[in-house]
Amino acid sequence: MTPTDLPDHHAFSVRSALEQGVSPERLRTTRVPAPFPGVRSFAAPRRGVDLPPEQRHLAHLELCRAYAQRMAPAQFFSHLSAAHLLDAPLPARLRWDEVHVGVRPPDRAPRVAGVVGHRLAGLFGDPILIERLAVVSPADMWCQLGPSLDIDELVAVGDHLVRERGASGRWLHQRLPALCSLDDLAAALSGSRHVGAGALRAALPQIRAGSESPKETELRLAFVRAGLPEPVLNHELRDRWGRFIARLDLAYPAYRAAFEYDGRQHATDPGQFAKDVDRIHAVTRLGWSHDRFLAHHLQAGAAVAVDRARERLIAAGWRP
């Protein structure tokens, strides 16, 4: 049955459908999933399904869009929902199919099947809009993840929030502002009491503004904790005429050494692989060493990557 007479092909409330003249019989006989009481959605996924990590942000977005159809004006998405909507890196062990909704006192937190309600006092910032959805501020979201993530995972989320964004080209880098600053994270953490504050306080000084992926964060942390110098993140390498050559994930300009993490797309995309080969040639032609690491190099505390980086830096003149 083609749902052309229903209010919206994305998500809608039963009340809005009835107000627009859709008959109760039509709503009963049309097979439209009901992710929440009083809500119908053609796009929201079924809860309880084990989705791969790369699909979870979009799936959660559809659940949030569905819940928004019955959302009270004072409510906003918080905690893990805010993290999904902000594209923050989250570990696969966490549930993706519970929607977290917050309110400020004296309003009462929602009690709806499939929703985790929170009554939140002392927030650092006002909610922001993402995809026309009200979402708790990025700094507050980071603090709310304290009970759910370990220290390294909190660092990865913090790196994601404070990094600049944008596309880079050969001649010009167009950068967009970060979602929040390190000062914002510190102020949000100090402004009120948080569950998991110990992990948050341990993570805060390890957050850096230049990391562009959770694996880069993992690699940087492994290097520093093994006693290697702290690398420059996403260093812009240029030739003697000032022409842009590459952005290097982790760089040691004093030793002309670069280390990078390559995800699966670099191996499965022939075009990307060809670009990588040309890029590495351009980097090494300027006298830099270049090492690439894959997922298996980061196992066991990234021992293989650390050993290789240490050897490379010592050969270039670094002394532990």
Image (cartoon, grey):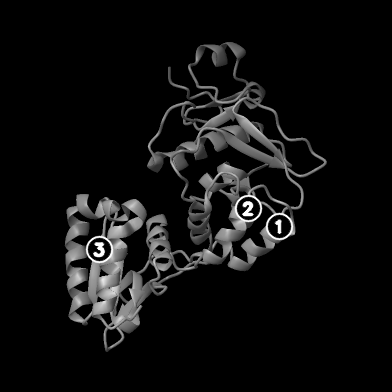
Provide the secondary structure element on which disc 3 rests. strand
In the rendered image of this protein, does residue 99 appear above or below residue 293?
above
| Residue 82 numbered mark, or none | none
Which mark sits nearer the N-terminus, 3 or 1? 1
For residue 280, which quarter of the picture? bottom left
Asked whether, in this view, residue 285 is left or right of residue 26, the answer is left
Q: Residue at x 17, y 73 (%)?
A: 281
Question: Which quarter of the rendered picture does the N terminus lie within?
Answer: top left
Residue at the spot of label 3: 292
Q: Position of residue 160 (x, y in %)?
A: 49, 58
Provide the secondary structure element on which disc 2 rests. helix
In the rendered image of this protein, does residue 145 appear above or below residue 212?
above
Disc 3 vs disc 1: Cβ atoms closer than 8 Å?
A: no
Q: Residues within 10 Å of mark 3 (few under 14, many from 20)?
A: few
Identity of the amino acid at label 1?
A: Phe
Disc 1 vs disc 2: Cβ atoms closer than 8 Å?
A: yes
Residue at the spot of label 1: 124
Q: For this rendering, which residue is in front, 317 or 290?
A: 317
Provide the secondary structure element on which disc 1 rests. loop
Identity of the amino acid at label 3?
A: Arg
Q: Is residue 75 visible?
A: no
Q: For this rendering, which residue is in front, 280 or 68?
A: 280
Q: Separation of disc 1 and disc 2 at Cα?
A: 10 Å
Which mark sits nearer the N-terminus, 1 or 2? 1
Disc 3 vs disc 2: Cβ atoms closer than 8 Å?
A: no
Residue at the spot of label 2: 143
Q: Residues within 10 Å of mark 1 (few under 14, many from 20)?
A: many
Q: Position of residue 27 (x, y in %)?
A: 56, 16
Asked whether, in this view, residue 247 is left or right of residue 78, the answer is left
